Image: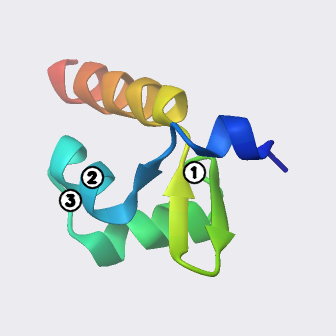
């Protein structure tokens, strides 16, 4: 589990959906399937911005090839 200090910089579902170009529901599914590092809180899901960047780069490179 990430520390509170670390969670302060994490992204919301909406932010991740906008960055990746996916629906909010799909982003939540990625978290539930552990394809994105995320933590479920009382306020909703929070996503590790580093993991989001890696996922985006991976998806971009797989589409290019």
Point out the tag, 2 or 1, that comes first from the N-terminus.
Answer: 2
Q: Residues within 10 Å of mark 2 (few under 14, many from 20)?
A: some
**Would you say the residues marked 2 and 1 are in contact, meaning their CB atoms lie under 8 Å apart?**
no
Disc number for residue 61: none
Q: Look at 52% across and 76% down and name the residue there.
A: 44
- Of residues 40 and 59, the one nearer the viewer is 40
Which residue has dot 2 on it?
A: 15
Q: Look at 47% across and 72% down and name the residue there.
A: 29
- Of residues 34 and 2, the one nearer the viewer is 2
Query: Which of the 4 image quadrants contains residue 12?
Result: bottom left
Which residue has dot 3 on it?
A: 22
Cα–Cα gap, marks 1 and 3: 14 Å
Secondary structure under tag 2 reads: helix
Q: Look at 57% across and 51% down and name the residue there.
A: 35
Q: Look at 63% across and 46% down and name the residue there.
A: 37
Left or right: 6 as drawn, with respect to 31 = right
Left or right: 58 as drawn, with respect to 65 = right
Image height of 54 relative to 5, above or below: above
Quadrant location, the C terminus: top left
Q: Nearer the viewer's eye, disc 3 or disc 2?
A: 2
Image height of 54 relative to 40, above or below: above
Secondary structure under tag 1 reads: loop
Cα–Cα gap, marks 3 and 2: 10 Å
Q: Position of residue 8 (x, y in %)?
A: 57, 43
Secondary structure under tag 3 reads: loop
Which residue has dot 1 on it?
A: 35
Cα–Cα gap, marks 2 and 1: 17 Å
Image height of 44 relative to 59, above or below: below
Q: Residues within 10 Å of mark 3 (few under 14, many from 20)?
A: few
- Of residues 17 and 42, the one nearer the viewer is 42
Image height of 50 relative to 27, above or below: above
């Amino acid at each position: 589990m990430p520390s509170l200090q670390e969670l302060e910089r994490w992204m919301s579902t909406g932010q991740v959906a906008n960055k990746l170009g996916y629906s909010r529901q799909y982003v939540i599914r990625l978290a539930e399937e552990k394809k994105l590092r995320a933590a479920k809180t009382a306020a909703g899901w929070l996503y590790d911005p580093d993991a989001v960047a890696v996922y985006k780069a991976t998806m971009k490179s797989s589409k290019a090839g």
